[in-house]
Amino acid sequence: MRFSNETTHTIGVIAKLQQDNKSIGGVTTMDANMCAGHDDKLAMINPDLAWGRCVENGANILLTDYPKKWSSI
């Protein structure tokens, strides 16, 4: 799943899926346009603001170029 900004309808779709106890799959953080700017580049500076925000928006799987860093958080 991808969302270019946090006001997109996709965030609502994610919330609805969670209400229905369904998994959304993955959110890619490799490209800022696919995760409302909360990408890997930002994660190297502030993981909570990047990956953490994706999780707050409903992601339960992150597709990242830095899986070892993600798994160490």
Image: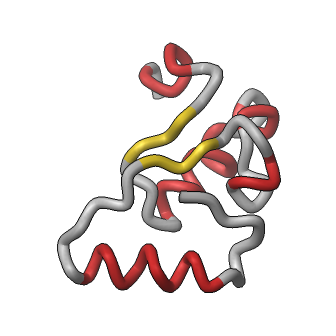
Image location of residue 24, percent across then percent down: 37, 60
Which residue is painted at 25% across and 82% down in the image? 19
From this viewpoint, which residue is outermost toward the left? 21
Colour mapping used in the image: secondary structure
Q: Quadrant of residue 45?
A: top right
At x 81%, y 54%, the residue is 33
Observer-nearest of 53 and 7:
7
Picture residue at 45% right of the left edge, 56% below the top: 59
Q: Nearer the viewer, residue 53 or 11?
A: 11
Residue 64, image x, y percentages: 59, 30
Image x and y of residue 10, in percent: 57, 77
Residue found at x 53% / y 58%: 1
Q: Position of residue 62 (x, y in %)?
A: 49, 40
* Above-or-below relation of 25 to 56: above
Q: Is residue 27 left or right of residue 49?
A: left
Answer left or right for 62 relative to 17: right
Task: Please tell me whether residue 5 is drawn above or below residue 34 in the rendered image.
Answer: below
The quarter of the displayed image where residue 44 is located: top right
On the picture, is 23 further left or further right than 11?
left
Foreground of the two, 59 or 34: 34
